[in-house]
Image (cartoon, helix red, strand yellow):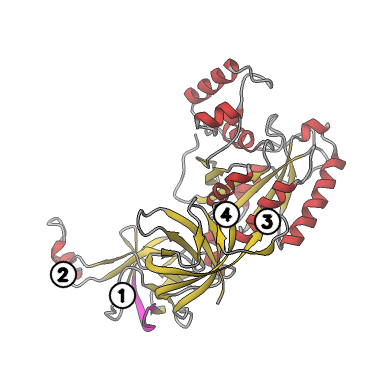
């Protein structure tokens, strides 16, 4: 397995698509060809494949990701399977998501934090209803990059015309859903064509292989750092005072005696020493006097680094506060319309009381209205008074305290929420801010 260096960026991607399009096989092939599988695991999968009489040789790549017993017995993916690997250029977290309609919530979970989603299409079937459904969810989540992998191209005799027809249809669907910058490539997960190595059997395809594409696409954090205003949700206020280690030098002890640092992970943008920032709540302006990254002082920091900032003024800012670039602090809101992705079997109705987590702040909230439900086949809105598991719809939330919300289309971090059951702490739903 390739070692990860400090300079490598982390790229998150998920797989989606209809049942039996070969998602788990593609992920297994990708891990295998990227040399991210240990020898003992390879031997175990090979032995299991032979015992089950795998029809395509002695190695079933899907077994590298389908880890649950029920998945192996039924030959399907039920839960999201996360895998970690690295190449010389990048480290990866991949999420192999289920294709069945009843597991749409799992697909939402795997894709919500993804930099890219790979949607598989069976070359023999083309784009089908479930493919459109998954592309619709990807559109609602505003995933930055969509890769459409036309799989099983070997079963069409590597026919260029078949690929071109699917490519044209994919572009048509993407336009309907408002997806931009999609990438379409022909692959064979079973045979390994255009996964890691370029296939000689598709000379008509001149684009990158799948791994080449994943190694070069920009991450969400890279995009937000370049295009977004600075945001730091405060996770912890550091006040060493008398708690310094006895090994700390006298000079450092004096230096940190009155230290007050605001620690957290930069969710968007970048910051430099000397920048003027404002703090939510309150809107008080101050100057950044110091930046500490991994125990060392720095002149600047950018998303998604974890940092500790020191400020010129002593402000009353605790966990849940947001430090933002001057003049960009969102107005506090007590109400918002959100797109709700229902993840829990318990139904959401008007009057449901929840906890809402936004950044590092958690507040009480009320579902004051269920507005409608999405028809994921057409993306239209249907009248509804409740949202059941796996359904997506719009609701109105009222908060017990002001939240610095931003439209999700402008900021994935500032416009995302998690709804939590107040009694047992279970995650009820994920939500994105869509309007007032």
How far is disc 1 from disc 2 in space, using C-alphas? Answer: 24 Å
Badge nearest the viewer, 3 or 1: 3
Is mark 1 in CB contact (under 8 Å) with mark 2? no
Residue that appears at 46% across and 46% down: 5
Where residue 357 sits, quadrant-wise, is bottom left
Query: Is 284 inside the magenta-drawn segment?
Result: yes
Secondary structure predominantly adopted by residues drawn in magenta: strand
Query: Is 253 inside the magenta-drawn segment?
Result: no
Q: Is residue 163 visible?
A: yes
Q: Is residue 281 left or right of residue 33?
A: left
Quarter occupied by the C terminus: bottom right
In terms of depth relative to the viewer, which is nearer, 131 or 94? Answer: 131
The picture places residue 265, in percent across and down from the top left corner, at 40, 62
Mark closest to the chain's N terminus, 1 or 4: 4
Q: Secondary structure at mark 4?
A: loop
Tell me the residue that label 3 is attached to: 376
How far is disc 2 from disc 4 in space, using C-alphas? Answer: 44 Å
Mark closest to the chain's N terminus, 1 or 2: 2
């Amino acid at each position: 397995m390739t070692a990860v260096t400090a300079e490598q960026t982390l790229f998150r991607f998920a797989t989606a698509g209809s049942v039996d399009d070969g998602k788990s096989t593609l992920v297994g092939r990708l891990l295998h060809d990227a040399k991210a599988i240990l020898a003992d695991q390879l031997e175990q999968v090979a032995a299991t494949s032979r015992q089950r009489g795998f029809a395509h040789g002695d190695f079933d790549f899907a077994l590298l990701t389908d880890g649950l017993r029920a998945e192996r017995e039924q030959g399907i993916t039920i839960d999201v399977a996360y895998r970690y690997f690295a190449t010389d250029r990048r480290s990866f977290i991949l999420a192999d998501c289920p294709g069945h309609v009843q597991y749409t919530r799992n697909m939402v979970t795997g894709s919500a934090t993804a930099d890219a989603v790979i949607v598989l299409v069976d070359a023999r079937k083309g784009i089908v209803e479930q493919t459109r459904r998954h592309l619709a969810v990807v559109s609602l989540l505003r995933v930055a990059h969509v890769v459409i992998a036309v799989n099983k191209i070997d079963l069409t005799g590597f026919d260029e015309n078949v690929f071109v027809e699917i490519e044209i249809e994919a572009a048509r669907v993407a336009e309907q859903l408002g997806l931009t910058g999609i990438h379409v490539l022909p692959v064979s997960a079973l045979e390994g064509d255009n996964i890691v190595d370029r296939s000689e059997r598709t000379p008509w395809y001149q684009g990158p292989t799948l791994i080449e594409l994943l190694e070069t696409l920009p991450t969400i954090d890279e995009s937000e750092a370049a295009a977004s205003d600075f945001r730091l949700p405060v996770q912890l206020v550091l006040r060493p005072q008398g708690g310094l280690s006895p090994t700390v030098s006298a000079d450092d002890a004096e230096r940190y005696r009155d230290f007050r640092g605001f620690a957290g992970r930069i969710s968007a943008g970048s910051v430099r020493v000397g920048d003027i920032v404002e703090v939510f709540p309150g809107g008080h302006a101050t100057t950044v006097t110091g930046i500490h990254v991994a125990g060392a002082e720095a002149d600047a920091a950018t998303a998604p680094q974890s940092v500790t900032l020191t400020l010129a003024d002593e402000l009353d800012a605790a966990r849940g506060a947001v430090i933002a670039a001057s003049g960009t602090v969102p107005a506090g809101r007590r109400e918002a319309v959100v797109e709700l992705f229902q993840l829990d079997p318990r139904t959401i109705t008007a009057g449901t009381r929840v906890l809402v987590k936004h950044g590092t702040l958690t507040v009480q909230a009320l579902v004051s209205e269920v507005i409608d439900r999405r028809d994921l086949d057409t993306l239209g809105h249907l009248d509804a008074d409740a949202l059941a598991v796996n359904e997506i719809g719009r609701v109105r939330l009222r908060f017990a305290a002001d939240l610095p919300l931003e439209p999700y289309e402008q900021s994935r971090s500032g416009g995302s929420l998690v709804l939590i059951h107040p009694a047992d702490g279970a995650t009820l739903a994920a939500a994105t801010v869509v309007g007032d």
